[in-house]
Amino acid sequence: MRKLVGIALLAAMVAVAGFGTTVAQAKDLKVGFVYVSPIGDAGYSYAHDLGRQSVAKMDGVKTFYVESVPEGADATRVVNNMARKGDDVIFGTSFGYMDPMLKVAKKFPNTTFMHCSGYKTAPNMSAYFGRMYQARYLAGLVAGSMTKSNIIGYAGAFPIPEVKRGINAFTLGVRAVNPKAKVHVVWTKTWYDPATEKEAAKSLIDIGADVIAQHQDSPGPQEAAQEAGVYSIGYNSDMSAFAPKAHLTSAIWNWSAFYPVVIEKVKKGEWKADNYWWGLSEGVVDLAPFGDMVPKKVQDMVNARKAEIKNGTFKVFAGPIKDQSGKVRIKKGEVASDKMLTGMDWFVEGVEGSNQ
Amino acid sequence: MLGFTIEKRQEPLKWGSFFIFLVALVFSLGVSALLLAIQGKPPFEAMYLLWDGAFAHDWALEDTILKAIPIFLCSLGVAVCFRMQIWNIGAEGQYALGAVGATWVVLSMPEAPVWVIMPLMFVAAAAFGAIWAIIPALLREKMGLNEIISTLMLNYIGILFLEFLVYGAWKDPASFGFPMTIMFPDTAVIGELFGRIHWGILVCAGAGIALTIFLKHTRLGFEIMVSGENPRAARYARMPYSALVVLVMGVCGALAGWAGLIETSATLNRLQPTVVVGYGFTAIVVAWLARLRITSIAGYSILLAGLRVGVENLQLELQVPASFTGIMQGLILLSVLAGQFFNWYSFQRSKRG
C-alpha cells in the first residue's frame, strides 16, 4: 500500500514538471480585465464581461480576467501581475482600482491602462466611463409614468458621485412626467451583496414604494419587487429574466460598443491617453426592452426623448435645477459641466434621504 | 467493526504530526484537483499554476508575504485570546479601529518629522484597537455578556465608524467626493525594506518573538495558559482571571490595530473603506489551523496568503471562478483539522479471540 502511494506521488510530480505554462502566440495582443465582483449572470461585472467577450472575438487578441478583486492592495497585485505576464492592455473596471493602476502604470510604461469610473490619467493610462445618467433619466420617465403611490424606492450602493449622479438624473426624469412623485434613497454600503440589496428594497416597499430602482451589482432588488407585486427598474444588464412580472426596463451598459474600439486603436498605434465619456449616442449606455406592462404611449414618449438626447437637442442636467434644500444649483439656461457631474455630491429636489 | 478499533495514544504524535499535516494537505489539494477536473480544467497544470503564482518566483513570494503580514498579526492576537478560551472574533473591527487611530495621528500632525509621527501612529493604532477589544472584555467580566456576540457586533460598528469618518470629516477635498483621505506624507508611510517587502515584517517578527517569550517564560503567560485550561482552578489559585481576560483582549486589539496601521500606511498610503477586506476573519481560520502555536501561525498565514495569491494565477490562466479560493480554503481547514484526530488516536487491528 505504502509503495503504491509512493509511486502515485512520484507520477504526480513528474506530471507536474511536464506541464509548462502555456505560452500565448507572440503576435497576439493580450488584454486583461479586472472585475470587482463575480461575473455571475447579471450586473456590473457581467456587463463588462460581455464587452470582454466581444474583444475576445477579434482577430489576434487573447483576453484574460480576474474576478472578485477587492479594491486596494489586492488590486495592485493583480494589475501588477497582469502587466508582468505581458498583457498589452489592462482594463480595471472599478473606481477603487484608480490609484493601484496609476502606481503600476508608472512601472510599465509600454502597457496601456484603461481605468473605469475614475478621474486620474497618465501618459499610458486613460480614464473612461459612460454617461449612464442619460439612461437613468429615461428610466426615470418610465418610473414616473408607472407609479401610483408617487413613492419610488432607490437602493444605492455607496454615496459617491457616480451613484448620486444616477439618482439625480433618475429623479429629474421621474419629476418631468410626475412632479408630485418623490424618490426615496437607502444606502446598502455594498456593491455586491444580494441579500442586503433585497432587504433594502423590501424596506422601501414597506414605506409604500411601488417602483424599485437600484444602483447595485445583483438583481436582488428586482426579486424583492416581484415578490411584493410592485414594479422595478434594473441596472447594468437586462434583468427581465429575474423578475419578468416586475421588470419595467433596465438602464444598461453596452461595453461592446467601446472595448473593441479601444483595442482597434491600440493595434493601429493610434491610442493615446484620454478621458472617454461616451453615452447614448455612441451606444455605450442604453435602455433594455420595455416590459409588456409599459403602455405604448409611455414607450413612445421615452423613445422620442432618447432620440433627442442622442442628437444632442436635449440635455439631462439643464437648468434650472434646485437641490434638496431648494437652492438653485444649475441656473436657467445653463448646462452642468462634465467637471460638475464628475464631482456631484448633492441631491436634486425630489430625492428623499441622506446624501451620506 | 471492520476489523479495526480506535485507540487513544499514550502521548500525542510529535514529528508524525507533520506527516499527518502533509497527508491532509495533499488530500485537500487532491479533492480540489478533482473538482477542477470535473469542470474540465487540467488538474495537474492547475496545481502547478497555483504553486507557480504563490511561491515559485521572487515576485510571487513577495506578494504572498505582503498579504501574510496583516493576517499574521491578527492571528497572533486571536490565538492569544483563544488560548485563554476567550472567543474573540472581533479582530476585524479592532483592525479597522487601528487604521482609524493611525490615520488620526497623520491627519492631526501631517508636518511632524518621522521620528515623532511614526511612533505615535503605532501607539494610537494599538490604543484604538485595544480599547475596541477591552470593551467586550469588560462587558463580559462585569455583566456576563457573551464575548462572541459582542465582539462580532463591534466589528460592524468599528467598520461603520471608519466609513463615517472617511465619507465625512476626513474626506480629501480633492477626491471629487470619493471616500478617501489625503495621501499620507512620506514620513507616515512604512517604507520598503527589501524588494517590495516593507518593514512591517519586522513588526511581525518582533511581535511573534515577544509574545513567545511572554507566554512561555513569564508568570502572566503561565497564568493565561492555566486560566485557559481551567478557569475555576485559576480563580481558586487566586489568579487575577478578570484582569487576564482584559489583558489578552487588549493584546489582541493592539496587534490587530497594528495590522490595520500597516495595511493603511504601507500598501494603501491613505485610509479608504477598502482597507477592510476580512483579515480579521481569516485570522480565526489561521489560529485554529495552527493550533494556536506561534511558529505554526507564521506558516499558515503564508500558506493561506499564498492560496489567495495563487488562485488569481489560476483565474488568469484557466478562468477558474474566484469562489474557488473559498472552496480550497474550506477543504484545507476541514482536512487538516480532521487529520489532527490522528495526533491523539490511532487505528489498531482488532484482535479476534
Image: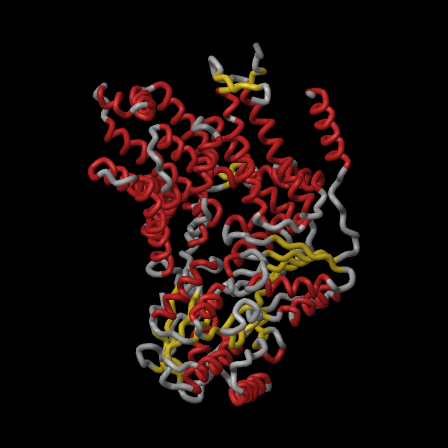
How far across and down, in percent of the image, does residue A80 sit?
Answer: 61, 49
Q: Is residue B110 visible?
A: no
Give the camera-side residue of B23 and B6: B6
Q: Is residue B11 visible?
A: yes
| Colour scheme in use | secondary structure
Question: Would you say B314 lies left or right of A62 here?
Answer: left
Q: Is residue A103 above or below residue B121?
A: below
How far across and down, in percent of the image, does residue B144 sit?
Answer: 23, 38
Give the camera-side residue of A238 and A86: A238
Q: Is residue B152 above or below residue A15?
A: below
Give the camera-side residue of B50 and B273: B50
How far across and down, in percent of the image, does residue A316 sit?
Answer: 49, 82
At 27% across and 34% down in the image, what residue appears? B246
At 58% across and 12% down in the image, what residue appears? B352
Q: Is residue A330 above or below residue A14?
A: below
At 45% across and 84% down in the image, what residue appears? A145
Question: Would you say A95 lies left or right of A208 here?
Answer: right
Q: Is residue A88 above or below residue A343?
A: above
- Quadrant of residue A149 within the rendered picture: bottom left
Q: Quadrant of the C terminus of chain B?
A: top right
Q: Quadrant of the N terminus of chain B?
A: top right
How far across and down, in percent of the image, does residue A120 sit?
Answer: 53, 63
Q: Residue furthest top?
A: B353
**Figure label count:** 0
Give the camera-side residue of B257 and B238: B238
